[in-house]
Amino acid sequence: MPSPSHTMHTILFDGVCNFCNASIHFVIDHDQAGKFVFASLQSERGQALLRAHQYVSDPNDPQSVVLIKNERVYEKSDAALEIARELSGLWPLLSVFRIFPHFLRDGVYNWIARNRYRWFGRLDACRVPTPELRQRFLV
């Protein structure tokens, strides 16, 4: 099992959200350099990482994806844009959305977050990664 280092970036996500799980698989598919490792916000490891970075999140009602990169914590639209910046292909071009004020970007993010279970569904428990992906997930 990997442990995050200065070259690894940790994405903490809602492990029971279908949209969030699909997003993690998208990141895996476009992270050819293997920069990211993952943990569910509901997991003990995820909660320990949040506490270590003085970030408060209700594990029963996670409201944001969280990226820990170089010991800095990003959330909501900042996390999404920072993740895109590290992906292969044209995805780093999404950084152009940083020109929009933070309150607008997070407003759109919050709207999607509020509706994600209704639109995409919810799992009863966190999905278990396949054996080949297991090494990218922190347990």
Image (cartoon, rainbow, N blue to C red):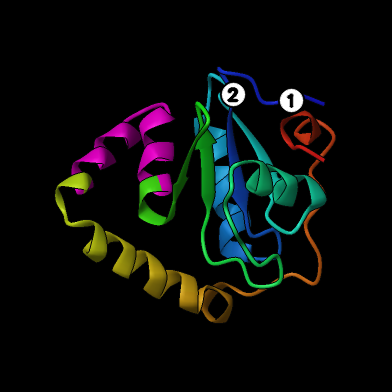
Q: Does 107 sit left or right of 15 as displayed? A: left
**Callout 2: few (<14), some (14-19), or many (20+) C-alpha neighbours within 10 Å?**
some
Question: Does the residue at mark 1 contact the one at mark 2 (Cβ under 8 Å)?
Answer: yes
Q: Does 69 sit left or right of 135 as displayed? A: left
Q: Is residue 94 magenta?
A: yes
The residue nearer to you, when weighing 53 against 24, is 53
Element type at mark 1 = loop
Give the x, y percent position of residue 10.
Answer: 60, 36
Splitting the image into 4 quarters, where does residue 53 fall?
Answer: top right
The magenta stretch is: 79-97
Of marks 1 and 2, which one's residue comes earlier in the chain?
Answer: 1
Give the x, y percent position of residue 137.
Answer: 74, 37
Give the x, y percent position of residue 51.
Answer: 67, 48
Q: Quadrant of the C terminus?
A: top right
Residue at (66% x, 41% y) in the render: 52
Tell me the kind of residue under disc 2.
Met
**Above-or-below relation of 56 to 97:** below
Residue at (71% x, 71% y) in the render: 60
Q: Is residue 91 magenta?
A: yes
Question: Mark 1 sits on what residue?
Answer: 3
Which label sits on residue 8?
2
